[in-house]
Amino acid sequence: MMRHLNLVSLAFAAAVLVSWAPAAAAQAQKAPPQQQQPAQPAAPKPYKPLAVTLPAPLNDPSLEAFRKEMVAVAQRKDKAALARMVVAKGFFWEREDGKKAPKKSGVDILAQALNLAAKDGSGWEALAGFGAEATAAPLPERKDILCAPANPDFDERGLEELAQTTDTDPLEWGYPLRPDVEVRETPNATAPAIEKLGMHFVRVLDDDSQSTANTAGEWLRVVAPSGKVGFVPADALTSPAGAQLCFVKEGGAWKITGLVGGGE
């Protein structure tokens, strides 16, 4: 199952950016130190665009109202109010690392997963980002549960083939949240546009250069289909490998019931 993530709104942004970074090859256990060389990322090159269709907004006024309340709670950083919005029992956390969720209350698991204790407020911003998400879809193995964001429509096999033909990892690829996103020459909104992105997958590069040192989290370095390298606003791109917040109705009222993704 593929999932996606708004890179600016959610606290898992940093984790997704790291996962998009070209992975180093595992070092051979028996090789001497001088022979242990990490793999280099594939050089940027042109590629055939793979189309993606964004999910439609969910038409459920009751869930929309609940998510608006969640945004307000996040803005106040009100954990007591958040606790009342989380199921009393049965909260689940399907971690990416496969580890079991800690034995805590649902709200405490959620707080740990989103890092609500972060001094920079990124955890609460993540919660607000989930609340602002307009889409949601049933979790395949839990049909009574809705998880947001909903999955986009694309050819998963096609993404694997795209990664193979470019010598990359599928986790290096994201897609725009809107059409005609302009790829800038430098990470600056006034920089010349070198290309426009259609609704297709785009390769995201790991970037620790000085050019983005003062704009961390605001811009992503990408490879356009032409092979040109440039920058797009981080809030314009999404990953199919991000986290989902899940909701369930209890007694006619919505509750936060779980989280899919995250964990180290």
Image (cartoon, helix red, strand yellow):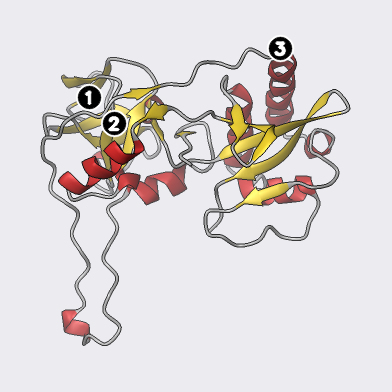
| Real-space CA distance between mark 3 and mark 2, rounded to the nearest whole angstrom | 31 Å
| Residues at marks 3 and 2 touching, judged by CB atoms closer than 8 Å | no
- Considering depth in this image, is 242 or 69 the residue closer to the camera? 242
Q: What mark, if any, has residue 183 been given in the picture? A: 1
The amino acid type of the residue labelled 2 equals Phe
| Real-space CA distance between mark 2 and mark 1, rounded to the nearest whole angstrom | 14 Å
Q: What mark, if any, has residue 149 been given in the picture? A: none
Image x and y of residue 56, in percent: 50, 16
Q: Residues within 10 Å of mark 1 (few under 14, many from 20)?
A: many
Image x and y of residue 97, in percent: 53, 59
The amino acid type of the residue labelled 1 equals Val
Figure check: 31 above or below 67: below
The amino acid type of the residue labelled 3 equals Pro
Q: Which residue is mark 2?
A: 201
Q: Which residue is mark 3?
A: 61
Q: Nearer the viewer, mark 1 or mark 3?
A: 3
* Left or right of 11 in this view: 82: right
| Real-space CA distance between mark 1 and mark 3, rounded to the nearest whole angstrom | 36 Å
Residue shown at 88% from the left, 27% from the top: 251
Residue shown at 52% from the left, 54% from the top: 96
Does any portion of residue 118 appear in the rendered image?
no
